[in-house]
Image (cartoon, coloured by chain):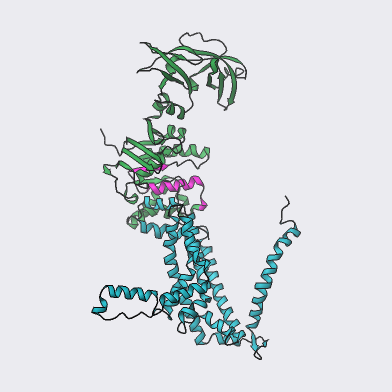
Amino acid sequence: MTRPIVSIKNVTKRYPGVVAVDDVSFDIMPNEFFALLGPSGCGKTTLLRMIAGLETSGTGDIIVDGQNMEGVPANKRPVNMVFQSYAVFPHMTVRNNVAYGLKVTGVAADEIAPRVEEALEMVQMGAMADRKPDQLSGGQRQRVALARALVKRPKVLLLDEPLSALDAKLREHMQLELARLQQVIGITFIIVTHDQDEALSMADRIAVMEKGGVRQIAGPEELYEKPQSRFVADFIGKINLIDATVSGTSSVGVTCMAKGLGRVVVPHDGAASGSVSLAVRPEKLVLADTAPSSGADISAKGVIRDVAYYGDVSNVFVTCPDGLELAVNVQNDRAAAGLLENGREVYVSWHPSDTLILQE
Amino acid sequence: MENWKQNKAVFWVTALPGVVWLLLFFLIPLALIWGMSFGEKTSIIDIEITGTLANYSRSFEAVYLKIIWKSIWISVISTAVCLAIAYPVAFGICFSPARWRPLLLLLVILPFWINLLIRTYALIAVFRTRGTLNFTLEWFWNLAFLDKLIGPFQPLELLYNNGAVIVGMVYVFMPFMVLPLYATIERLDRSYLEASLDLGASQWRTFFSVTVPLTMPGIISGIILVFIPMLGMFLVPDLLGGTNAIMIGNVIARQFKQANDWPFGAALSFLLMYVTFAALALRAFIGARMKGGVGV
């Protein structure tokens, strides 16, 4: 097995009165695109800054490329960072910004120029090399920040919310761009983001953080399809959470009494007992005018309360018996036309195997 | 609401007090002095404005040029010392815990609450032959048994020389340097410093390649704010420099008082003002060159 490029071992960081990072441990493999995802204040940025050496006085070990970073100052670490504000030096041209990291570490002058050109080409900023940062747009400034970090040929590139300051269109474009760059250069990227779409679309693996701790580490698909806790299920994408009580376990699955649904049987490996949440993604739900014919499906009769139209899809909110509210994602195809109107009686159904049982 | 710029009456009512004030107490006296600089004394109290340039040509006599030159270099050194001390102080205040900052700033401003004259006299008490500093030095001298080994302590002559004037000026003008520096350093985005460290620069390299250029507006404001009044200072050289260290301010003051030669004093004053304008023009020039970068 290959050696991890970054090992986080029992890392804890306390500020007066608050634990920013709470006993976190995980490994990141070489060439991985790794995302730290969580709501603001979950400790993801603090953890990233600890890897960069900008945040000190934490406990635990951070090992980068086999070397313990304990006591290694930020300017001696084999990692580079793209800052959220980009921090492109306003008093230097684009070229000098990119050359800075090489100049200060004593790289030979005749080596600097070609490396700077190469880095600028990589982010398609070669034509703007002699501009000052205030003549650049936000997206261009970010490319400069990227080139400035990449020109150092770091073992690991750290990105702190790199896309949060860009508008939606540009953000989508840069997501693809970052993923492409990472594949071309073949170094490890660690990105911090609060945007789940960003993490899902770019990262190979995602660590979901909450209140300083890591709740789950998995690939995008596993994280979306098999969240292990209510928090992760709720944070990644949209999900219907239905309160239920386990009444028995059999070879078919777990039998529960669910709010608004009555008795349902859900396939589940592992134990379940007491109060649980049944979780099902809105796009797994099907709306119909008539009761579903397949008896195996879980279904409920309800009334459409609200329809949110998004062009390609509509989010339909259905009120079922017992105060159960279900969100349903409906493709706006011909079948949906005419069905989606407030106050209409509909049947919501889904396959039991699309249901997750979340203990908590 | 109506735009005040479009309402002429409102504009003039609000602008009038300021305009009158500037006219009465600044521009008119200044014009009088300027006119006087082209005048001649006809008796002890009468001055006739004849358009003569004699006062200016007299200003360029070697003895006065020497004093002007000396005023410039003493001010340059004092400004440099001020900057060297104020920069770390301002930096320290900016990077201290937020709850300490108002108190530390208050300590910088505190000397303003005491009259300049009293502060300068206090410096005399510290620096004179039998003053606080010499007593302290003597105490250490005796503590180290140097009085038994070498002989009794010889008090240092700290007053009435150029050094005393420089120390006094630095002391008096320090807050004017600290405050603009504090204002710019405080606004400095720390991620620039972190980025520099992250890219492999040492703390020193970061300071000279990133911190100093990005705080240049504050440095320049501080220099202007300190250098110009230093150039015309007469109280500090008078009290601490004695007869050995007179500056152009003392010469000017003497023309208006003891010598009773207002036309010549006026000419010297305006020469000083031209030097000041030159300094401001230099600032504008540097500002224009830096435009597109940080801006001033």
Report if residue B49 is visible in the image: no
Q: Is residue A259 above or below residue A39?
A: above
Is residue B133 visible in the rendered structure shown here? yes
User: Residue reaching furthest left?
Assistant: B149
User: Quick one: B106 or B78, which is closer to the camera?
Assistant: B106
Instruction: Identify which residue, B185 or A176, lies in the foreground.
Output: B185
Picture coordinates of residue B129, whole percent (x, y):
39, 80
Q: Looking at the figure, which quarter contains the C terminus of chain A?
A: top left
Left or right of residue A229, residue A2 in this image: left
Quarter holding residue B16: bottom right
Residue lying farthest to the bottom in this orientation: B43
Query: Is residue B272 rendered magenta in the image?
Result: no
Q: Colour of chain B?
A: cyan
| Colour in which chain A is drawn | green
The residue lying at 69 percent from left, 72 percent from top is: B24
Residue B157 coordinates in the image, percent (x, y): 38, 80
In reply to whether residue A157 is colored magenta, the answer given is yes
Give, as a single range, the part of the protein colored magenta.
A134-160
Considering only vertical position in the picture, is B23 above or below A159? below
Rendering coords of residue B61 (x, y %): 52, 87
Relative horizontal placement of residue B94, taking residue A287 as reference (left or right): left
Residue at 61% x, 86% y is B53
Q: Does residue A188 sit above or below A256 in this rendering? A: below
Residue B228 horizontal/vertical position (percent): 53, 72
Which residue corresponds to the image point at 40% horizontal and 49% vertical from the top-left? A148
* Front-lying residue, A168 or B45: B45
| Left or right relative to A181: residue A292 | right
